[in-house]
Structures are given as structure tokens and as C-alpha cells.
């Protein structure tokens, strides 16, 4: 009997072997800023639980290594991820001394590598299953509900990141609201401006080259540099334009952050609008003209609906980009989850960094899945609408 190995499974099994047996599973610190003490899986969990987790990880790694059925690989990845998520909370309770409110227990590199490996395996399985858009959204919803249940159960309360959250709960939600407002508000402004600009660029060739060149130049400016460049002109506007300061326009804060994100958002929206409209089949336009449709009717009734999936791809790029870039807004007083990231860097408190970074990554990941599903749905409708 010939044993066949899965190429991706070899990589995953190697990562799991290192993370489970050589890398630390959790880190114990006497307080939030002192250096931590690395603890292995067996040292981080009660006597009967550590070997059980190792057995689950080894079996799941073997399933990933061999060419096994997709259903079995799916079950292995889900069980391994669930075991890791539950038992890291157990490790937090087990390692925290009784009555000690200063100790901090954090997931260590081994835990994160294991999460990465089995998430990678799960993503590969879901890709091979070729799920429908609604099914992918269902998987995302189930994952969100599972994480929500874990948080609500209090099983992670002993972990340092949750202790940081408990100390800053009001600030967390306030900065989260600012982060979402910056990311979505700048996207909405870019769509309002970028769609008409893209339509104009599609219709006027000479105008197209100039606009796209300018937007390309803006896109090459580093984000921190662009935030800095906007401080001086906005300060001037706040000082010399009546009512500008009352509207919140000033050199630092939300205004320069919003404007910078808006400028970064324009190129993907405008460029994808141009590409989408250019890709509309000539036959569709000719048929519309033959029916006596005006230019306006053809634009909104034929061209724009057929170009919408391509335009939506640009909006997806902007959404994910803005969720990440909004983190840097904290450097100029714009708020957002970046406040915790830079506070944590300044205090050498990695758990505070994670308090800002983890929700940012989660939002970007969820946004990409949701918009990808919408793009696929609209693309399917576009193919059905095109003449055979």
C-alpha cells in the first residue's frame, strides 16, 4: 500500500510539530510589563488536559499530512481550532495564582502558529469544497457566534488581552466607533466622488490619463507622510476659513486622517470604474442603442449594472485597505484601534498592542469575505444577463 502525502499537509504538519513540541504555548508574567516566562503545552495545562491536547494536535496533523477526504480534513481543522480556543482559556486560569490580579497570561508563539496552521488547513478545505457565497457567509457567521459565545462564557477572562479590555472597555468601544467611522466614511466619500469621476474618465480619454496619473502619485506617498503633509494646509484652513474649526477641521485629529484615507481610496474606485465600463460588451450597447435608449439610460440600465462586479472589487480593496490604514490615524490624534497599538508599543505591553490589532484584523478579514461573496453573486447575475 502506497502512502500519499498532501503537499500543503507537509507544511502544516511541520508547523504543528514545531509549535506543539518546541515552541511555548503560553507566557506567564508577574505583571503587564515585565518579561514573560515561556510555558509549554504540558506546563500550561492541568495534568490530564495537556496530553489530550497534544493527541488532538498530532491526529489532526496526520490527517492534514495524508491525502484524506475533505470532510475528515474539515473535521480535524475545526476540532483542533476549537480545542485550542477553549484550552488557552483553561491555561489562563491554571497559570494564574489564586487571588493574584497582577499576573498576566498571554498566548505564546506556539499557540499562534497552531492557530495559523489549522486556519490555513480550514481555508484550504473550504476552497476545495467550492462553497457558494451564502455558504461562505454562513461559515463566517458560525465562526463569529462561536467566538462570541467564548467571550460571553468568561472562559477567556483570565487571559491578559481580556484583562486589558476590562480596564479599557469604554475607551475600546469609543475608539472602535471612530475606527469604523473613519474606514467606512472615507470609503463612502470616495464612492460618491470616484464613481462620477470614473465615468467621466471612461467617456473622455484625455481627462482619463491626467486623473489616473495624479491618483497614482498620491497612492505612492507613504501613509504616515501623507498624514503629516495634510497637517499644515488643514491648520491654515482652520485658522483662516470662518467656521472651519467649528466643523472639526484642524491640523491634527479626525480631519487629516479622513482626508488621507479618502485620497488613498480614490484610485481603486476610479480605476475599477473605468475598467468595468470598458469591459461592457459592445453587443449590449449596440442592442440598447437599437432599442432607442439614451446615453443616460444605457449608463444606468446597461453599462453600470454589467460593470458593477468590477467596481465592487475596487470597493473591496478600499474597504480592507482603509480598515488597516485607519490604525495609523492614532498617530495624529484621529483615534481608532491604533490608539491601543501605539500605547502598547510605548509601554512595551504586547497585550495592549493585540487589543488594537486583533479587532482590526478580524474586521478586515470579515469585510473581505462579505464583499467577495457579494461580488460573486453580482458576477453570476452579470453572466446570466449577457447574451449567449
Image (tube, rainbow, N blue to C red):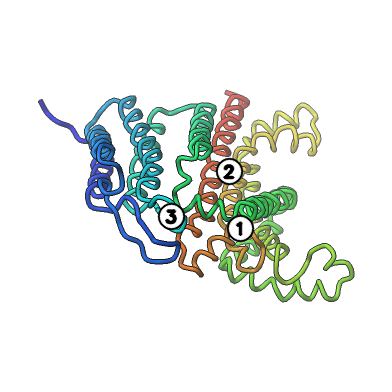
Q: Give the image location of residue 94, x and y in percent.
A: 35, 46
- Of mark 2 and mark 1, the one earlier in the sequence is 2
Q: Nearer the viewer, residue 209 or 156?
A: 156
Secondary structure beneath dot 1 equals helix
Q: Nearer the viewer, residue 220 or 306?
A: 220
How far apart marks 2 and 3 lie (CA) works out to 50 Å
Picture quadrant where residue 324 is located: bottom right
How far apart marks 3 and 1 lie (CA) works out to 36 Å
Q: Is residue 90 left or right of residue 384?
A: left
Picture quadrant where residue 309 is located: top right
- Label 2 vs label 3, nearer the camera: 3
Q: Which residue is mark 1?
A: 326
Q: Say few, some or many: other residues with alpha carbon within 10 Å of mark 2 (under 14 / 14 to 19 / 20 or more).
A: many
Q: Which residue is mark 2?
A: 313
How far apart marks 2 and 1 lie (CA) works out to 20 Å
- Label 3 vs label 1, nearer the camera: 3
Q: Is residue 364 placed above or below 207 in the rendered structure?
A: above
Q: Which mark is residue 21?
A: none
Q: Give the image location of residue 39, x and y in percent.
A: 29, 53
Q: Is residue 320 visible to the viewer in this orientation of the structure? A: yes
Going 64% across and 31% down the picture, which residue do you hit? 283
Q: Say few, some or many: other residues with alpha carbon within 10 Å of mark 1 (under 14 / 14 to 19 / 20 or more).
A: many
Q: Is residue 374 left or right of residue 127?
A: right
Q: Which residue is mark 3?
A: 100
Q: Nearer the viewer, residue 152 or 249?
A: 152
- Of mark 3 and mark 1, the one earlier in the sequence is 3
Amino acid at each position: 500500500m502506497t502512502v500519499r502525502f498532501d503537499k500543503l499537509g507537509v507544511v502544516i504538519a511541520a508547523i504543528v510539530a514545531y509549535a506543539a513540541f518546541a515552541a511555548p504555548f503560553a507566557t506567564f508574567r508577574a505583571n503587564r510589563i515585565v518579561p514573560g516566562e515561556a510555558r509549554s503545552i504540558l506546563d500550561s495545562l492541568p495534568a490530564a488536559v495537556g496530553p489530550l491536547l497534544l493527541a488532538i494536535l498530532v491526529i489532526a496533523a496526520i490527517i492534514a499530512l495524508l491525502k484524506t477526504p475533505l470532510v475528515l480534513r474539515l473535521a480535524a481543522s475545526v476540532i483542533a481550532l476549537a480545542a485550542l480556543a477553549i484550552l488557552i482559556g483553561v491555561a489562563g486560569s491554571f497559570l494564574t495564582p489564586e487571588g493574584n490580579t497582577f499576573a498576566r497570561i498571554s498566548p505564546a508563539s506556539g499557540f499562534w502558529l497552531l492557530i495559523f496552521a489549522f486556519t490555513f488547513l480550514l481555508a484550504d478545505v473550504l476552497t476545495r469544497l467550492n462553497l457558494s457565497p451564502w455558504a461562505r457567509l454562513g461559515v463566517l457567521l458560525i465562526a463569529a457566534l462561536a467566538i462570541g459565545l467564548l467571550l460571553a462564557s468568561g472562559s477567556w477572562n483570565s487571559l491578559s488581552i481580556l484583562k486589558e479590555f476590562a480596564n479599557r472597555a469604554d475607551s475600546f468601544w469609543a475608539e472602535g466607533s471612530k475606527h469604523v467611522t473613519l474606514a467606512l466614511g472615507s470609503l463612502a466619500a470616495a464612492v460618491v466622488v470616484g464613481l462620477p469621476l470614473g465615468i467621466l474618465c471612461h467617456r473622455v480619454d484625455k481627462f482619463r490619463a491626467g486623473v489616473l496619473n495624479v491618483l497614482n502619485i498620491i497612492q505612492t506617498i507613504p501613509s504616515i507622510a501623507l498624514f503629516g503633509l495634510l497637517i499644515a494646509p488643514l491648520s491654515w484652513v482652520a485658522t483662516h476659513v470662518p467656521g472651519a474649526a467649528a466643523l472639526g477641521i484642524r491640523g491634527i485629529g479626525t480631519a487629516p486622517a479622513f482626508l488621507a484615507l479618502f485620497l488613498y481610496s480614490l484610485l481603486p474606485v476610479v480605476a475599477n470604474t473605468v475598467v468595468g465600463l470598458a469591459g461592457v460588451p459592445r453587443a449590449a450597447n449596440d442592442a440598447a442603442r437599437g432599442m432607442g435608449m439614451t446615453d443616460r439610460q444605457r449608463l444606468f440600465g446597461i453599462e453600470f449594472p454589467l460593470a458593477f462586479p468590477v467596481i465592487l472589487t475596487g470597493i473591496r480593496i478600499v474597504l480592507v485597505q482603509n480598515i488597516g490604514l485607519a490604525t495609523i490615524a492614532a498617530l495624529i490624534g484621529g483615534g481608532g484601534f491604533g490608539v491601543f497599538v501605539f500605547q502598547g508599543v510605548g509601554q512595551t505591553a504586547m497585550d495592549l498592542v493585540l487589543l488594537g490589532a486583533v479587532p482590526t484584523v478580524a474586521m478586515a478579514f470579515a469585510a473581505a469575505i462579505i464583499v467577495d461573496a457579494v461580488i460573486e453573486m453580482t458576477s453570476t447575475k452579470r453572466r446570466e444577463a449577457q447574451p449567449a
